Amino acid sequence: MHKYPLLSKLLLIGFLMVLLAIPLSLVRDVIAERTANRFNATQEVARAHAGPQTITGPVLWLPYTETFLRTVKVEGQVGQTREELVTEQRVSIQFPQTLETQSQLTTETRMRGIFPVTVYTSQHASKGRFVWEEVQPRNRNGQVTLGQPLLLMGVSDARGLLAAPQLRLAGTALPMRQAPASSPLPLAAQVDLAQLKPGAVLDVALTFDLAGTGRIGWVPLADENSVTLTSPWPHPSFGGDFLPRTRSVSASGFEATWRVPSLSSGAQAQFAQAGKERAPLEQFSVGLEDPVDVYRLTERATKYAGMFIVLTFAAFFVLEMVKRWRIHPMQYLMIGAALVLFFLLVLSLSEHLDFSLAYGLASTACIALLGHYLRHVLGGWRPGLAMSGLLVALYGVLYGILVSEDNALMMGSLLLFGVLAAVMVATRQIDWYNVMGSDATPDTVLPAARSEASSQSKPATAG
């Protein structure tokens, strides 16, 4: 290997990069562990406070019995039939024609250890209208017997109800209680059967306060659904099956309005399906997620760690060739260890500080350490400062990639292209045969290189 010093150096640097992958994987394990701890902290707060909420209803739920005669064949007697009386239990579900909801939401941050969890309380006021349709028997000779009608509504986590919902139907206050076990929604109010006359217009008003964690959503069960939500939370994340028709987001909060007709939603048909095979209900929601997820950003940073180390080592190696510096493989290892430690510093500091501040402190500490170390390795402040400037540029580009997720691929591609261009320009006059220590003769050198060398060796003649 002494015959090929450049090759042996490259192999040693490659081995060091593989060796540094071990502590990098340990850093990724720490990030995964802290992410899991944060998730557990959120779940614990949700269990004590209330979890994500989805508001469903109100809907009118009327159980009834249909009795009818059915003709069946008499067993053992060909062509003989008889009639039997059949009784079937059915349910009539009637959705509101219109439902308009005005909601306000305020947030609060609660700490679980070192992990912040965003919880909320919300106030809701809904107004809607039912137009009752008479229940018709499904069989031609059927007789219908109506049961006790209920007005149903539901929330995902009933522990979030701060008080009993206030409900009025056709001007009459109805107490809201827990629904029967056979009901598809957890809250119910008994409705006077005498009010349910064919074509009767029943105006409904519903107000309640609801607490939750992380997300709030609505199921659009009315023929015409309208929900307007206002909140001082400045970083909403709109999700679900429908985006808001109008929204405005600023540093002081947001306001969003959803308008969903039943013609564009399958929620009514999904709700009407009975049994455990019911499809998940379509809904729209808004999440109160932290816009700067330090664990996600740190994990993304470690994905670029390999490229970061390769670029740093490549810069040192090229300058070692161009400037004739002598950097020992052990010194490469020290520099790589400092680069790996940077990602652990970012993680630990960002749990207590803003991510940008944590990144700045960690990068400043690593650049100062490497600058001081390189001053002695390279034999002076000037080369040490020059390499520190290179590291500043690399850390700056990495931060830009992290905070600009949409442009990360473009920025990374431009960075790699720029580094390759710099390496090619810096090494364009290096005689790699001599550097490799091979037995190359002038005949093995390209003709263009020989002609350029010969022209540079000719003495200048006086004109």
Image (cartoon, helix red, strand yellow):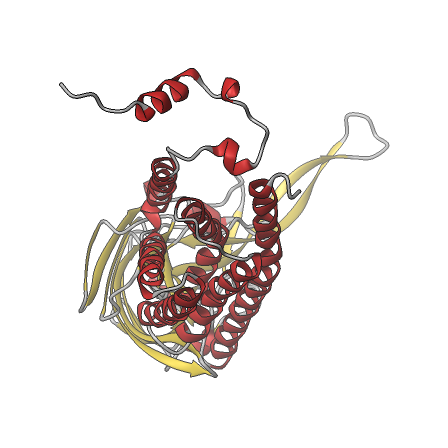
Q: Seen from this angle, which residue lies furthest left?
A: 463
Where residue 460 appears, as percent x and y from the top left, is: 23, 24
Q: Is residue 117 shown to the viewer in this render?
A: yes
Q: Is residue 433 above or below residue 69?
A: above
Question: Percent x, y for residue 139?
Answer: 54, 40
Q: Quadrant of residue 346?
A: bottom left
- The one nearer the camera, 73 or 233, is 233
Q: Is residue 210 above or below residue 21?
A: below
Answer with left or right where residue 236 lies relative to residue 301. Answer: left
In the visual, does 171 lie left or right of 212?
Answer: left
For the C terminus, the quadrant is top left
Pick out the residue farthest to the right.
76
* Percent x, y of residue 291: 33, 63
The residue sitting at 49% across, 67% down in the picture is: 341
Q: How many marks?
A: 0
Front-most of residues 252 and 409: 409
Which quadrant of the figure has residue 150? bottom left
* Residue pictured at 61% horizontal, 44% vertical: 8
Query: Is residue 276 something that shows in the picture?
Result: no
Where on the picture, by quarter, is residue 298?
Answer: bottom left
Q: Position of residue 342 (x, y in %)?
A: 45, 66
Q: Nearer the viewer, residue 342 or 150?
A: 342
Q: Quadrant of the N terminus?
A: top right
Q: Is residue 377 above or below residue 121?
A: above
- The outermost residue toward the front is 462
Q: Nearer the viewer, residue 271 or 400?
A: 400
